């Protein structure tokens, strides 16, 4: 590609309305342009990066044995009513009416559509296991679209759905997908962590999220450096003062049970605290008068700070408690609220009337134990499955007691769910097993936020000059820059021939033949994050060398053709 024939439009000024670095740099580099709230046009430059991510995702999904297909973006209401999600998905579901007054939605995820496909296509256990995937546009009417493509309303997701005769086989594929995700994010050059997660509106029995680690991440993760333990602290995201009006609206909605989502509970806590809640640990207390909750703000790995008692539902009884009161309430000694060093997961239903549930991490310290809540959900077990706070949910890992619980921020880029039979049962999807008996296949579903990855990668890989792409995501691996292309025909010819040679050698290279002055030209090439820059100039040509600089290096080197090629191969 020649930049003179491409469309590259960078900006010098940092856009005022962008809050986080990836959003700023994507706008400055001209990768995306906003069409409306949460809706972005991908420029030719941005699209090249998006396609790179897609390619890695496809390659690894194919390698893992999944098969690609494509389902419609617009889906009929009747299908979504079969699983109850026409209602349950809530206001994120964009509903559309056609000229015949029929209702449709724009797909936010495709469990219904794929289960419909499966019930028509799959008849026998012999066709299983199978894992269908697609890379398509999804729409979610996010309450607060922000940070550009990071939390957009329209975005690109890879979603996969697997079907199995047995739970054991589902577990095998879940593990296969877990490993595949780890390979994908490793190949993309991202620093990430897999954590236990809430099963949320999608439902199911087990789930892990994959997070790219970044301080700007919307999720808080609790993990232990000394062991395998890691979980998403879903409650971490709450309201900032500017967002209180929206939160107050949420609070009103909380009165209707189905609205009690993780986000709502977090908003509610934010309002109650009258402050921004950054990292939250919830401590569950099994008081006689019904479940009560103690909220502690966490700083680092210490549970200290302001502590409040919350009595759900209803905030009438919500009041500030002193640390001494909390200790008394728990019957604990001073110092009890120290760092956690051992943990296990339990489930507690916070409020039977709304079936809001929390997964808790139980952290032990030398003073006994206390609880740090990690997840809230609402598609929850029947009330009689309500756990006593001391009950450990079967199948949860047993605590290993290693390490100290730490907190980090993360960006959710992938999510794997063991769904079980929830969708196959609701939609009467069956296959004949070995004995000729009709059985509902067990299902898994596996999502990757393809477009979000582009932004998440920038959060981790940038400097003052712009993006520093990990090579597999870069729009081009190398740029050949011509100094004064019109001024010296030999320089242009040398640059052209190098450009061709590099591409022929499989090194995807762009030629900067726009004739910009060196300063602005180099600034662009750095801003858009090309990993390798080669400058062809009159002086270099005379010396038989090219000026080479890696994007991550601070100095240039003069290399002859051979050394340059071997450097880039
Ligand atoms: P989040 O917690 O960030 O709202 P989610 O848990 O609702 O995400 P999933 O239903 O797990 O999302 O969808 C799979 C993946 O799709 C997510 O892991 C994320 O990477 C991506 N994704 C979800 N919502 C958005 C969005 N609004 N914009 C961009 N990517 C998104
Ligand atoms: Mg979401
Ligand atoms: Mg999530
Ligand atoms: Mg998720």
Image: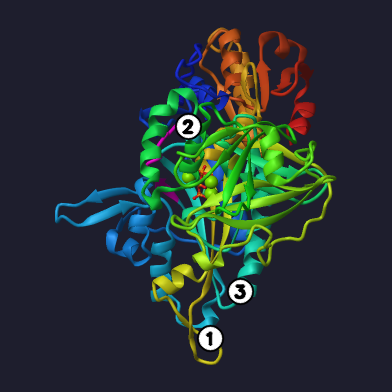
State the extent of the magenta-drawn residues as a range.
136-148
Mark 1 residue crowding within 10 angstroms, few (<14) / some (14–19) / many (20+): some
Q: Which mark is residue 433?
A: 1
Label 1 SS: loop
Label 3 belongs to which residue? 167
- Marks 3, 1: nearer the viewer: 3
Could you give the CA–CA distance between mark 3 and mark 1, rounded to whole angstroms?
13 Å
Q: Position of residue 438 (x, y in %)?
A: 47, 86
Of mark 2 and mark 3, the one earlier in the sequence is 3
Q: Determine crowd level at label 3: few under 14, some 14-19, many 20+ residues with C-alpha closer than 10 A.
A: some
Which of the pair 407/165 is nearer the observer?
Answer: 407
Q: Earlier in the sequence, mark 1 or mark 2?
A: 2
Q: Identify the main secondary structure in magenta.
A: loop
Residue, disc 2: 271
Residue drawn at x 65%, y 57% is: 389
The reply to whether residue 421 is visible in this rendering is: yes
The correct choice, above or below, for 66 with respect to 255 in the image is: below
Q: How many marks?
A: 3
The quarter holding residue 191 reads top right
* Residue 339 part of the magenta segment: no
Q: Please say whether residue 139 is one of the residues in the magenta stretch.
A: yes
User: Residue extending furthest left?
Assistant: 100
Identify the secondary structure beneath mark 3. helix
Along the viewing direction, whichever of 483 and 222 lies nearer the viewer: 222
Residue 210 lies, in percent from the top left, at 63, 47
Q: Residue 76, position in %: x, y?
A: 28, 59
Q: Are marks 3 and 1 in contact (CB under 8 Å)?
A: no
Answer yes or no: disc 3 within 8 Å of ligand 1.
no
Instruction: State if disc 3 and disc 2 touch (CB < 8 Å).
Output: no
């Amino acid at each position: 590609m020649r930049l003179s024939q491409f469309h590259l439009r960078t900006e010098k000024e940092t856009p005022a309305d962008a809050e986080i670095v990836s959003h700023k740099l994507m706008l400055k580099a001209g990768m995306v342009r906003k069409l409306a709230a949460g809706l972005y046009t991908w420029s030719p430059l941005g699209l090249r990066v998006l396609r790179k991510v897609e390619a890695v995702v496809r390659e690894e999904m194919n390698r893992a044995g999944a098969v690609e297909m494509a389902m419609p973006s617009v889906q009929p209401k009747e299908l979504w009513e079969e699983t109850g999600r026409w209602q349950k998905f809530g206001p994120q579901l964009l509903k559309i009416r056609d000229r015949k007054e029929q209702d449709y939605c724009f797909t936010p995820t495709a469990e219904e559509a794929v289960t419909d496909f499966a019930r028509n296509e799959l008849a026998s256990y012999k066709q299983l296991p199978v894992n269908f995937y697609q890379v398509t546009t999804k729409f979610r009417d996010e309450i607060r679209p922000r940070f550009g493509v990071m939390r957009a309303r329209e975005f690109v997701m890879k979603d996969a759905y697997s079907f199995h005769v047995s739970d054991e086989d589902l577990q095998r594929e879940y593990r296969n997908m877990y490993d595949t995700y780890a390979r994908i994010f490793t190949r993309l050059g991202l620093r990430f962590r897999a954590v236990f997660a809430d099963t949320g509106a999608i439902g199911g029995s087990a789930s892990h999220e994959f997070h790219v680690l970044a301080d700007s991440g919307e999720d808080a993760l609790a993990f232990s450096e000394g062991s395998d333990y890691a979980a998403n602290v879903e409650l971490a995201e709450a309201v900032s003062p500017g967002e209180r009006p929206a939160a107050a609206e949420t609070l009103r909605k909380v009165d209707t049970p189905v609205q009690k989502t993780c986000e709502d509970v977090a908003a509610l806590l934010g309002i109650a605290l009258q402050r921004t809640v950054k990292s939250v640990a919830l401590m569950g207390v099994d008081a006689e008068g019904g479940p009560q909750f103690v909220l502690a703000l966490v700083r680092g790995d210490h549970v200290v700070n302001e502590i409040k008692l919350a009595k759900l539902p209803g905030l009438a009884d919500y009041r500030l408690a002193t640390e001494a009161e909390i200790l008394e309430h728990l019957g604990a000694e001073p110092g009890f609220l120290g760092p956690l060093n051992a943990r296990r997961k339990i489930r507690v239903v916070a409020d039977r009337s709304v079936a809001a549930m929390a997964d808790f991490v139980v952290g032990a310290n030398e003073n006994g134990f206390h609880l740090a809540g990690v997840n809230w959900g609402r598609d929850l077990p029947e009330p009689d499955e309500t756990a006593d706070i001391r009950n450990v949910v079967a199948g949860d890992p047993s605590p290993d007691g290693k390490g100290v619980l730490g907190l980090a921020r993360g960006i959710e880029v992938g999510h794997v769910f063991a769904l079980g039979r929830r969708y196959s049962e609701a939609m009467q999807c069956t296959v004949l097993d070995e004995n000729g008996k009709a059985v509902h296949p067990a299902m898994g579903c596996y999502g990757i936020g393809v477009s979000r990855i582009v932004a998440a990668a920038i959060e981790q890989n940038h400097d003052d000059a712009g993006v520093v792409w990990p090579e597999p995501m870069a729009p081009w691996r190398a740029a050949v820059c011509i100094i004064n292309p019109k001024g010296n025909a030999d320089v242009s010819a040398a640059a052209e021939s190098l450009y061709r040679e590099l591409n022929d050698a499989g090194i995807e290279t762009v030629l900067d033949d726009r004739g910009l002055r060196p300063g602005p030209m180099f600034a662009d090439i750095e801003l858009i994050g090309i990993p390798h820059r080669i400058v062809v100039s009159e002086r270099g040509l005379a010396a038989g060398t090219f000026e080479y600089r890696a994007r991550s290096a601070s100095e240039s080197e003069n290399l002859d053709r051979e050394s340059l090629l071997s450097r880039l191969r």
